[in-house]
Every structure is written in C-alpha cells, then in structure tokens.
Image: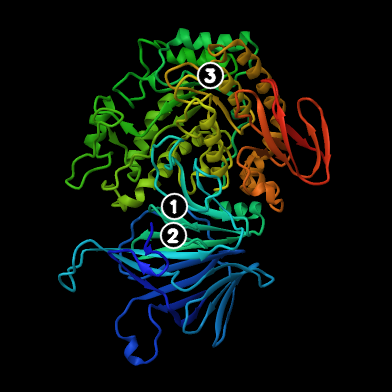
Amino acid sequence: MKFSNGYWLPKDGFQIHSAAQAYDVEVEENALSVFATSHVIRDRGDTLGGVVLNARYSAPMENVIKVRISHFEGGADGKVHFDLNEEKNFSPKIEASEKCASLTSGKLTVNIERSNRWNVVFTDANGGIVTKCESRSTAYALKKTHPEEHLFCKDEVPYIKEELTLGIGECVYGLGERFGTFVKNGQSVDIYNADGGTASEQSYKNVPFYLTNKGYGIFVNDAAPVSFEIASEKVSRVQFSTSGECLEYFVIYGPTPKEILERHTALTGRPALVPDWTLGLWLSTSFTTNYDEKTVMSFIDGMFERKIPLSVFHFDCFWMRGFHWCDFIWDKETFPDPAGLIKRLHEKGLKVCVWINPYIAQRSVLFAEGKEKGFFIKKADGGIFQTDFWQSGMAIVDFTNPDAKKWYQQKLQALVDMGVDCFKTDFGERIPDDGVYFNNADSVRMHNFYTYLYNQAVFELLEKNYGKDNAVLFARSATAGGQKFPVHWGGDCESSFESMAESLRGGLSLTLSGFGFWSHDIGGFEGDPPPAVFKRWLQFGLLSSHSRLHGSHSYRVPWSVDEESCEVAKKFTEIKLALKPYLMEKVREAHERGVPVMRAMLLEFPDDPACLTLDRQYMLGEKYLVAPIFTQEGDVTYYIPKGKWRHHIDGRELDLECGKWFSEKYDFMSLPFWEKIG
C-alpha cells in the first residue's frame, strides 16, 4: 500500500505522522523502550498533544531482534497469533548513553540515536550496516474517508508503516509462493491468500517474510494482509504496513541465506519429517474426468505394464458425489466397495490419498449437523455464512471451535479407518473477511490464518494415526508456519512452457520463505499438454522434492499423451528412486535445519553474483544442479558455478575455474542435470 505522492507529499486523504526523534529511551529488563515523537520537542509546549509512537526492541533468540511499534495500546486482542518459538530467558546485551542506546543479540545490534532526528541502524559484529530505519520511515498513518465533523466522531482507518533501507545491488526474495519476477524489487505485494492460479500476482501461499542477499531477513508478525512496497514507493527502501495500531517484525541475521532460513524456521517452525514413500511418483484421477474403479485399475495396471514405478494413487474430488462436497461418502455408483479397492491398492504396494476441503455444501448430509451444532463460520446477524461459489450453498467449518475441529477430524477418521493414508487438503483461500468466529477472532486476520488451522487439524489427525514421521498432506493454501504441515503444491497452472516457468518461480520463492518441500501438477492442470511440454515437465517434476501427475479435464497417465512420454516417465522416476537415500538426507536436513530440498541457486552460491537472479534452474540439495527445458526444440541456456561437475546422465565432466554459461540442445531423455564432485 502506498502512502506517498512522490517522495515529499502524502497521498490525498492521508495524514502521515512519522517518528521524528527518540525523545526518551527506557532500559527495561532485556529490552529497550523508545518514546518516539512525531515532531521534535524543543520546549514544554511541544509536549502537548501530537502522535507518539512506542518502539520496543528485544531479542527472542540469538541473532534475531524483535521490533514492536505501537500507537494506541487499548485495542482488543484479535486472538489470531502465529505460533512462534521465542526463547523466554534469552538475554541480549544492552548499552545506553546520552547519545545512543543499543541492544545486541549475537552478531546483530540495533542502535537508536538519541538526537533531534529519527535514526535506527542495524549493524553486524564488525559494525557494518545491515539495514537502517531513517527519517520518515516509522510512521502512523490515518486514511480519512469523510470530512472530519467532530473531534470524537472521525471516520478514519489507522495504519502503522515501517521502511528499511536497501543497499546498492540488494535483492529481495520470498514473500511466499509468488509466480511473478523472482527478485521482488520494484513490486507491490499484498499478503492475502487468493485462488488466482499461477498466472497472476495473487498467491495461494502468502508469507510475510523476505530475505535479501545482504545477510538478513524480515518477518512481519501479523496475520493481517500486510502490504509490502519493495523498492517501489521509495526505490531504496522496503516498506511494510498493516491496518491497526501496532506493527511487529523481526530482523533475522544470517549472514548466509541458509542461516537466515535456519533462524526464521527456528522461530516459525520447521517442516515435519515426511516418509520416504512420498518421494515416489503420485498419480491422480484428475479433476473433472470420468472415472470409476475400472478406470483407476486400468491406470495402475497400465503403469505397471509399462514398468513405470508408482508410489501413491490419488482420488480427486469426484470420489464423492457432485453437489455433496464434502460429505466424505464414496460415490456408490462408481466405487461400490471403497474399502476393498483401497485394500487392493495397498496389496500392489501403493499408498492412497483422497481429496478434501473445509467447505460443506448445503446438500451434504453434514450441513444440517454442522448447522445445528454451530460448527460453521457465521455472519454478523448470527446466520451461517454461505455462498454458491464452488459448491451450492456451502458453509465453511470454523476451526476456532474445538468441537468443530474434533467433529471434522472424526469424519476423516472414518476414511483413515478404511485405509486412506493421506489427504489432499485443497482450498482454504476464499475465507470471508467479515465472518464471525466461535472464539471472536479478528476476521480480517483469520483470512490468511484459516489455512493454518485447517491444515493443522488434518495433520494432527494423521500424526495420531500414523505417527510423527509418517503424516503427510498435499496442501494448496498456507501462511507463515504452514511449513510444519507438508507437503505443498503449486496450484492451478496452464499446460504451457510459460506456466511451467512461472510454477518454478513460485516454488523457489516459497522455499526461500521457510517451506522445505514443494510440488506441482506435472504437465499443467488446465488444458491438454502438448507432448513436448508434458515430457519436459515430467523431467522437471521428477527432479522436484515431490512429484505428482494431475490435471483438470484430461487424464495425466503418460500414454494419454504419447508412448515416448512413458519412456521419459519411467527413466526419470527410476532416477529419482535411485536418489532416494540422498533425498531422504535432504528431507532430514529440512526437518532439522529448515533448509529446503529444492534450492534457489543463491542459497548454495550466495557469493556468485550470477546466481542472484537465476530462476530457470535450481539445486536439488547442495549436490545436484537441475535446469529444466522450456522450449519445443530442446534448446536451453543455463549457468554452472565454478567447481568440478559430472553430468548425471551422460557422464561428461567439467572442471571450471570460474562460473560459465552453456547453451545446449537435449532430446527428451536428458536435460542439464549436473552433480557437484567433491
């Protein structure tokens, strides 16, 4: 959200009250509390009235500094809070003098200048500047929607904003799964979950966290739709703001990108340890296709006949009857013996996944039950929030109600008892901003946070049944902390090379936001993939952390495209399975350290300037470089950092004294897939 008209003036309709000086600094136990006035205090008369901001600096853990900026302190608790792992007994080093006060956490220090100007500087152990908060950065803003009529009858919306400086050549990454430009400089980003596909600025997974190539990350601790202006409103600053009277954020020091992610995930949570069977190939019925038990078995038999290894079979929406989603009852016309079918799939060595969402259609047998017990999100008038968008008359389960959560889990338990191994937790983005919740939670903040509660409820059920190391979801929506409930996939993409590339950008942004695992619909979800797109996407998908064949109105079994697709699927599934011991090491690393399996090049090579903007290739762990091919002809241009490398498929070796670009051509049985030696 932009507040300025150019650099000097506020936008029409806004009043901006910026921190002008640190008028007073109080040393508390393990914290600094700064009394920041919006004008310089020259005499007693200047102390009357005016906006005053309270800025409090503390340290929740080593190398992390917490900043809380507030105006009015009398607001109600919105009851929506990220689950953070702050160390209660951590003691930072605090120093205060007439000219400056400082708080140090490990190698990160915040310095507050005590003068007639606002100047807050974050420095590293050597005194080098990490980032700064300068003049007109920290501010309280009021948006006036009508003329002021009376002192106590004002129609205005409050905001708190903060601006942190960007150095020359500083690049910003992350902010969740974003499908636009990989480097976020120049973009306006609103942290607001939406079902917008992969071809828009919207995102299913919004995370108010970014990191830069200058050694630090910023996590804004607010579930509200935080707005970021990244070198956009002011080209040398990142601004973040939210409506209300308080803004809290953490400065997380690295200095390496991996160390930043380690500390960010230590704070917000690390991914659960996914079981090894999830690394194999998943096959779906697809969405609106016609299928029954005979179709399902023909898919599985067809994969086995072609010797394409298969690990998981997924039943999408129409395992239930249309207009009944979700009632969690198998369609008896197409699946008369679901328990027997699941048993037969298990006997073939397959795991079983079924599609669910948190919406209950009016025709579902569960609607009347949920209505009677008060288990749905309500409207202000006390009625149930309902919509015809997606399912006719659907209501939304209120997971802030412990009984509703238990009720939902009980319905899923019947499926687990039947033999279902995991759930695809679809949707969770289109949540009303004006809903009324059982615990009276702030509805605006619940919009993003809802998906956390939804996936948490399902994940906990699976953990209870299968143990901590064997629970897994296939989730679409998420926010901060959602990485604790893996796996996540990229959502609805088109069947094109352009969409394949935008999916990769989204995945790299997500894994730079604290998520350890990521998948996508091989071949694209919408449309019928041309053979070249499908085969190149097979290579890419089977060299991702998790791999699933899924589509919308057409099947994604490889022979539905062409027979060569079967050969590609077989070869790259076998390659991935051969890498399983290595990949499980990376899974454990993600679980223990928060370092993702799929890694942007800058994560492994932060000192190589060429890697800062690379978004058409990635590292699989620290050892393998993958450059998917996005052309019909098989042409690809990619970059290899300096070092010794061996091509994993054709065995070529390189010994590069410096990084080098390559332009090559590959058939469908290969691609740039290099192993780092030593």
Image mark for residue 530: 3
- Mark nearer the viewer, 2 or 1: 2
Between discs 2 and 3, the one toward the N terminus:
2
Question: From mark 2 to mark 3, how far is it between C-alphas?
Answer: 41 Å
Label 1 to label 3, Cα distance in Å?
Answer: 34 Å
Q: Is residue 607 visible?
A: yes
* Element type where label 1 sits in the image: strand
The three-letter code of the residue at mark 1 reads: Ser
Q: Please tell me the numbered disc located at residue 109.
A: none
Where is mark 2, residue-wise?
A: 233
Q: Position of residue 156 (x, y in %)?
A: 25, 64
Image quarter where the C terminus lies is top right
**Marks 2,1: beta carbons within 8 A:** yes
Q: Toward the viewer: 563 or 61?
A: 563
Distance (Cα) linking label 2 and label 1: 8 Å
Give the amino acid type for the residue marked by disc 2 in the picture.
Glu
Q: Nearer the viewer, residue 129 or 93?
A: 129
Which residue type carries mark 3?
Pro
Rendering quarter of residue 563:
top right
Count residues near mark 2 (Cα–Cα under 10 Å), then give few for <14, some for 14-19, many for 20+. many
Q: Is residue 658 left or right of residue 176?
A: right
Q: How is the image coloured?
A: rainbow
**Image quadrant occupied by the N terminus:** bottom left
Q: From what the image shows, is residue 456 above or below residue 560?
A: below
Which residue: 51% across, 18% down? 556
Instruction: Please indicate whether residue 193 sits to the left or right of residue 529 in the image.
Output: left
Q: Identify whether 60 is placed above or below 434.
A: below
The secondary element bearing badge 2 is classed as: loop
State the image quarter where residue 37 is shown: bottom left
